[in-house]
């Protein structure tokens, strides 16, 4: 059964946020990759959808206006506390933002919890200015990250895990919704930790793994993802597929 984003994170959003708070730089390469892809200009208006606890702002080095959009009340509350800014609680098929008013819509690693992506793409197209960009990054169907989530995490999380991942239809879906895709590629990078215990703790919190010890989590990471010790950091292999879609 596919559980919607808001249902999942009403129950375990606080754990996810704890992981991101304890290890705020673990996924810095991931955030930097999507920010680089977005080519954000000074003064840009950005929609962060879904915003989680509002982590994107910590990696943007220019002055921008960020509208944080959430469907989970738990995450909206955490995001407001974290950013000090108001958060818009809304369904992704009906975002209360003015038409043609946004420079960038950024969606990082949340879309695999959203089954109806077409409605989100259409709403993103509506709120973007002409030539504005929708930048998304998420796991690819059948790739090792999605296998780790839907096999290992599914087995060791009491809520289970079933994702609706990006796939061979994603580009045509974006084009159907009025976008021209000018970038689409899988990008490999690292999640970085000071110790293996930190790595296991982060995974336990981020993915709600409540049915496995740290040793078992590290076994699963080794089996599906792999890691290496590089310059005194434990570097875990991660990969998402990134898209940049320009509004026609």
Image (cartoon, grey):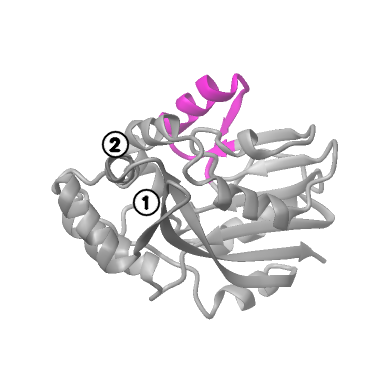
Q: Which mark is residue 149?
A: none
Neighbor class of circle 1 (other Cα within 10 Å; few <14, some 14-19, many 20+) is: some
Question: Mark 2 or mark 1, which is nearer the start of the sequence?
Answer: 1
Give above or below for 210 relative to 87.
below
Name the secondary structure under disc 1: loop
Q: Magenta residues, as a range?
A: 69-91
**Residue 47 seen:** yes
Q: Which residue occupies 61% across, 72% down? A: 185
Q: Is residue 191 magenta?
A: no
Residue at 58% across, 45% down: 49
Dividing the picture into quadrants, the one containing residue 202 is top left
Q: Is residue 115 visible?
A: no
Q: Which mark is residue 11?
A: 2
Locate residue 191, reporting x and y percent. Answer: 46, 51
Binning the other alpha carbons within 10 Å of mark 2 as few (below 14), some (14 to 19) or many (20 upward) gives: few
Residue at 63 percent across and 49 percent down: it is: 32
**Which residue matches tag 1?**
4
Please name which of the two marks, 1 or 2, marks the residue nearer to the observer: 2
Comparing 209 with 86, the one in front is: 209
C-alpha span from label 1 to label 2: 12 Å
**Residue 23: image x %, image y %?**
43, 35
Residue furthest to the front in view is 231
Q: Quadrant of residue 193?
A: top left
Q: Residue at x 46, y 70 (%)?
A: 140
Task: Say whether residue 84 is magenta.
Answer: yes
């Amino acid at each position: 059964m596919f559980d919607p984003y808001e249902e999942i994170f009403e129950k375990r959003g606080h754990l996810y946020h704890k992981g991101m708070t304890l290890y705020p730089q673990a996924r810095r390469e991931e955030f930097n990759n999507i920010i680089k892809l977005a080519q954000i200009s000074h003064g840009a208006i950005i929609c962060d959808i879904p915003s989680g606890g509002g982590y994107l702002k910590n990696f943007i080095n220019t002055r921008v206006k960020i509208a944080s959009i959430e469907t989970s009340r738990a995450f909206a509350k955490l995001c407001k506390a974290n950013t000090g800014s108001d958060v818009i609680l809304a369904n992704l098929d009906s975002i209360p933002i003015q038409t043609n008013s946004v420079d960038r819509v950024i969606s990082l690693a949340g879309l695999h919890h959203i089954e109806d992506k077409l409605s989100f793409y259409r709403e993103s197209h509506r709120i973007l200015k002409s030539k504005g960009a929708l930048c998304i990054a998420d796991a690819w169907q059948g790739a090792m990250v999605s296998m780790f989530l839907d096999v290992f995490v599914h087995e060791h999380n009491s809520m289970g895990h079933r994702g609706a991942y990006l796939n061979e239809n994603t580009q045509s879906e974006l084009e159907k919704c009025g976008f021209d895709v000018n970038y689409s590629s899988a990008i490999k990078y690292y999640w970085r930790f000071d110790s293996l215990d930190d790595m296991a703790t982060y995974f336990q919190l981020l993915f709600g793994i409540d049915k496995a010890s740290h040793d078992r989590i590290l076994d699963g990471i080794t089996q599906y993802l792999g890691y290496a010790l590089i310059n005194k950091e434990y570097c875990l292999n991660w990969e998402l597929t990134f898209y940049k879609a320009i509004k026609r």
